[in-house]
Amino acid sequence: MSYNKLTPALTHHLTAILGAENILLDDESKSIYGQDETEDLSFSPEVIVKPSSTQQVSEILKLANHHHVPVTPRGGGTGLSGGALPVYGGIVLSMEKFKRILEIDEKNCQAVVEPGVITQIFQEEVEKRGLYYPPDPASRGSSHLGGNLAECSGGPRAVKYGVTKDYVLGLEAVLPTGEIINTGGRVLKNVSGYNLTQLIVGSEGTLAIITKIIFRLIPLPRERKVLLVAFNSLEDAAATVASIFQRGVTPSALEFMEKAAVKAAETQLGKTFPNGNAEAQLFIEVDGNYEEVLAKDIEVIAEVAEKHNALDVLLAEDRQKIVDVWALRRGMGEAVKKISAYKEEDTVVPRAALPQLIRGVKEICAKYGITSICYGHAGDGNVHVNILKDKLDDNTWNTHVDTAIREIFELTVSLGGMISGEHGIGYSQKAYLPIALSPIELKLMKEIKRTFDPNNILNPGKIFVD
């Protein structure tokens, strides 16, 4: 794919739009903004721009579209599929200055925010008013809400409360050609034409740049309790998941962690956790407004776990214990990635298929001598499969890693699953998308992209193989 380079005249035009203080051209900045949290990938942009208004975003895109210069939108840079990588150079458009919470409407349980607001800050602000925004990716302390929309982030509490798309009522967005659009609105029902809001959410920054978000919120649950359930077998732990739901209990979080993931988190945090030597653990949270209801849910969960050969069931009731076990879970991804070079796959299957998925992953990796560590959101069937180079030599790793990933994805799809639950396809996974989607489905998606972005200047090189 061929794009034009940034010329001094274009740089001067960008400066006129933004002011020199909002344009970065130095090598250090190019290195920082040329990476996200995806493996060790890095692509240098030609310039980084930091607009602070929708009109500025519009003018930048009009300019880039006219001169056929690629634009890569960027939020917090916490993505795990290379969605913010400027693979064709050009302009990185950082949304970090769009960081205002414009309104929290307590009567209607809604909020209007800009996309550069950090997820955790938004959650804490609405909680002060007795409201709740449940989507909580592991990177919530640094990820931007706009990036969460781009990837349709989920996190642990998606099992009960849904993912990002379930809380987006409307958007202000700028098209790749520079037009400003408003989709959806501040109503809970809306079938006025195609649902452009939900088309843009999850489109990984390839269709439009979001500049304003209208969220729906829900009342904050008053009570919360956490269980840690230990097992001697990965498959017993995985099989317990579906059985809990069959008994009529819907936890607010239900996470699967194998021993190697727990050990990595212990090393990272410098703490030891109960039953750390168990082959697998389930981290289960229940929430609600009445302690007696939660007590009954906990009783049912314990009964189900016992039937699936649980070694131990521990209840964390006080606030500090709950904070400690959440720290274990939230630190797991970063801890595992420190072990060695890695590939992280974001598999998702119907939750009853979790035992087959985990067993299959282990068999595939063993066949090629590759280490795998699994953890993730078992309650909605979303398991993060970390494939580690560990002690393999470069030749063995390079020869077998792609084959192993393909076999894992083929297994996932055969079980009724998909190749990404919440991390997106981005740059790193696009070669595998045909495993999950048919040619006609891919064709329709590419046609949608062309309609929004006829010159393919917005976040090119993502989702589809060029």
Image (spheres, grey):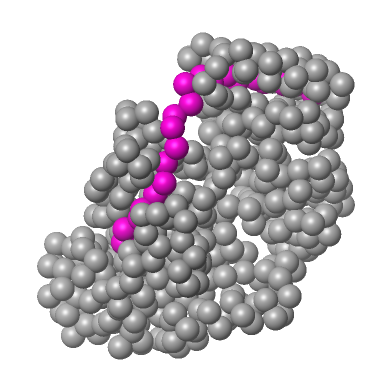
Residue at point 71% right, 44% down?
A: 381
| Residue plotted at (62% across, 64% down) | 429
Residue 185: % across, % down: 37, 59
Q: Which residues are magenta?
A: 210-231
Front residue of 319 and 327: 319
Between 289 and 9, the one nearer to me in the picture: 289
The quarter of the rendered structure image containing the C terminus is bottom right
Percent position of residue 435, x then y: 75, 68
From the viewer's perspective, is residue 371 above or below residue 187? above
Please name the predominant secondary structure of the magenta segment in the image.
strand
**Observer-nearest residue: 353 or 311?**
353
Would residue 16 be visible to someone looking at this image? yes
Asked if residue 218 lies in the magenta stretch, the reply is yes
In the figure, is residue 270 to the left or right of 260?
left
Q: Is residue 278 above or below residue 74?
A: above
Q: Position of residue 72 (x, y in %)?
A: 39, 69
> Residue visible at 79% across and 57% down?
416
Q: How many marks?
A: 0
Can residue 331 be found in the magenta stretch? Answer: no
Q: Is residue 136 left or right of residue 367?
A: left
Residue 108 image-quadrant placement: top left
Looking at the image, which residue is at 40% across and 54% down? 187
Residue 459 seen in this snapshot: no
Query: Does 93 sit above or below residue 448?
Result: above
* Horizontal and vertical percent position of residue 256: 70, 34
